[in-house]
Amino acid sequence: MEFESLKNARVLVTGGAGFIGNNLVRRLLAIGVSQIVIMDNQSSGMSVFLPNDARITFVGMDIDKMDKLNFVINQHEFDYVFHLAAHFANQNSVDHPFSDIQTNIVGTVGLLEILKFHKSLKKFIYASSSCVYGTAADMTEDTFIYPSETPYSINKYTAELYTQYYAHLFHVPTVSIRIFNTYGPYELAGKYRNVIPNFIEKAMNGEDLVITGTGKETRDFTFVEDLVELMLLAATGPSHEGEIFNGGTGNKTEILQMAEIIMKATQSTSSLVFKPARNWDKVKDRMSNTSKSAKGLGYKPKVGIKEGLEKTIKWYQDNYDKVQSLKNYFE
């Protein structure tokens, strides 16, 4: 059986109501874990989308509340922890820098501080971000980086450093995954959400698709199923304590090309509108180097941008009424 060591495992997923968490939880249930505790404050995800399964326990909470965090975790002996909870993302951190620190640093350190006493823990998987690379030309794991573009990039990198600190000093079995522009089902549109769900919703409604920049900028858009596969490989495969792996696909797509695929797939009447790039966004091209993930973990992303967007659009169309009823929540 694939991921045999996860069968009957006890799992904690922070941020499990978010779109990545939702996809991860569904995959873990299919593998056959015995228990999943989900912690989420529903700031960017909704528990209503989670599957109805007796193995799931949902705890609504902020990750930086140490007393409650300690109380919940110490009721369990987890085998695996997937730490996805985050104050997401760049523009949100520019607008709310203190909240970003509380969630992305304080919350992560609190989690690690408690888990350093849990001997049952086999792996702690931290969801980092490609934003830590900033404007680096070479996005490989051993590239020297010094992110300072946004509080989000600073704090995600700082949390990475803490995972290494707890690994090296306390032997917490941590591994970090640098996530590159992931998209897919269960991600809702909103002010601080990613470009793809916002473009899909606007295209379906015939509204303008606003591109900040020339549209020639590129990103490594990664379908969520591929990211979940990498996380499971990192959880069950060989890795050194504190090791870092890139997500991504190793391919880049122009923003304009992505927008055109969405417009065609939705048969949209929308227009493309170009505005100046946001003042903090200096990255023209971002593409992952996945050679270490491939060699060390056997990671092979399978879903191309066209197929991934079509799957995402179909989910959005199938759940349109439900998504619209929650729209104001993320405005």
Image: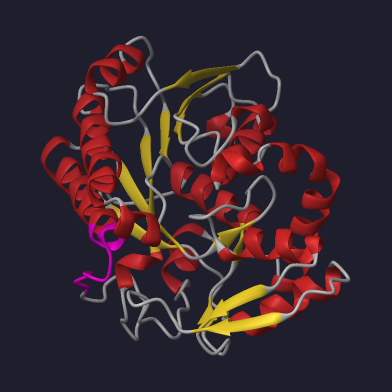
Relative placement, left or right, of 205 versus 150 is right
Main SS of the magenta segment?
loop
Query: Can residue 177 be seen?
Result: no
At 50% from the left and 66% from the top, the residue drawn is: 294
Residue 63: which quarter of the image?
A: top left
The residue furthest top is 75
Q: Give the range drawn in magenta.
A: 145-154
Residue 149 highlighted magenta (yes or no): yes
Relative to 239, say whether 319 is above or below: above
Residue found 63% across the figure and 61% down from its top: 198
Q: Is residue 235 above or below residue 280?
A: above
In the depicted view, which residue is nearer to us: 92 or 233? 92
Residue 71 lies in magenta, yes or no?
A: no
Left or right, 32 with respect to 70, comes to: right
Residue 70 drawn above or below residue 80 = above
- Residue 303 position, x and y percent, is 70, 65
Residue 165, given in percent of the width and then of the height, sits at 15, 46
Residue 85 in sight here: yes
The structure residue drawn at horizontal position 61% and vertical position 38%, both measured from the top left corner, is: 22
- Measured as percent of width and height from the top left, residue 246 is found at 42, 64
The residue located at (46%, 84%) in the rendering is 276
Q: Which of 269 and 68 is in front in this view?
A: 269
In this view, the residue farthest toward the right is: 267
Q: Nearer the viewer, residue 191 or 251?
A: 191
Q: Which colour scheme is used?
A: secondary structure
- Percent across and percent down for residue 20 are 56, 46
